[in-house]
Image (tube, rainbow, N blue to C red):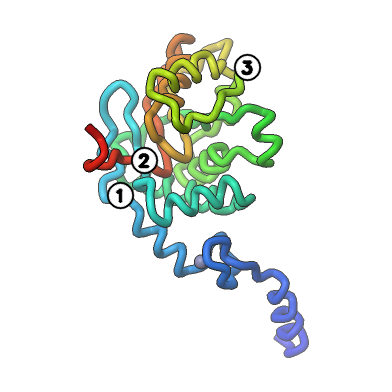
Amino acid sequence: MPSWTHNFKSFLNLFLQSHCPLCQRSTSDALCQYCARQLQNCAQKNPCGSWQGEIPVFAWGVYGGSLKRAIAVMKYDNQPDIARMLGVWLGEAWLSNSPHCHTQLLVVPIPMHPQKQKQRGYNQAALIAESFCQTTKLKLKLNGLKRVRETQAQFGLSMSEREKNLAEAFAVGQEFRSPCPDIPLLLVDDIYTTGATTKSAVQTLRQSGITVLGLAAVAIAVKDQHTSS
Ligand SMILES: [Zn+2]
């Protein structure tokens, strides 16, 4: 390569380089290597630990530490690239750990209310589902579910208040109404906390005769042993 081309490229790189949204080091990736490594340490050894019961949950990591921070930055600091990166990691974990990694599934992200999505500019669950599907080669159904009712923030509500808050928050998307899909669905979300949102979404789908295998989430909130009773 002639040296002027090389110089021009380095010159361009100066502008293409951006800063890591977590620590401000310069990087051309979604996160710098240091933060990406920190985040990788949040991965669960066994993502299938909660894959049981009425709504099985497959979770890449435990909600806390740098994962909690990365998710907050992804949602509230306009960093959709973090969602894409986490979606790939969730997909890789699914391929190497899930008992259903060879099952044909339709992937549906938990939707946001359109108004809220307009404010944020993207639905992080949809971005996670998108790169999850690119990694796993599963079929994405972006509009399998829709959010029909704006719900108040779940923070500070009791479990029964949360469920009431979320009742009828979802509706089955147009493409699933007729005919009903004949292969099971896997829901995708960023965080699984109390499960109230997932439960409401699953109920809506199951009431329409749609089979839901479970939920794949980037992070699962594990109850603190010291504060829970
Ligand atoms: Zn960083």
As measured in the structure, the alpha-carbon distance from the residue carrying label 2 to the one carrying label 1 is 10 Å
Above or below, comparing residue 15 to residue 131 in the picture = below
Quarter of the image containing the C terminus?
top left
Q: Residue at x 74, y 75 (%)?
A: 12
Q: Residue at x 41, y 64 (%)?
A: 37
Number of the front mark, 2 or 1: 2
Asked whether residue 183 appears in the rendered view, the answer is: no
Image location of residue 155, percent across then percent down? 47, 33
Name the amino acid, label 3.
Gln
Dot placed on the residue nearer the N-terminal end, 2 or 1: 1
Image location of residue 19, percent across then percent down? 61, 67
- Mark 2 vs 1: CB contact within 8 A: yes
| Residue under pointer 3 | 174
Q: Which residue is more in the foreground, 196 or 91?
A: 196
Element marked by disc 1: loop
Q: Which residue is more in the foreground, 155 or 203?
A: 155
Determine whether, in the image, residue 181 is placed left or right of residue 196: right
Element marked by disc 3: helix
Asked whether residue 151 appears in the rendered view, the answer is: yes
Determine whether, in the image, residue 115 is placed left or right of residue 227: right
Q: Would the CB of label 1 be found within 8 Å of ligand 1?
A: no
Name the amino acid, label 2.
Ile
| Residue under pointer 2 | 220
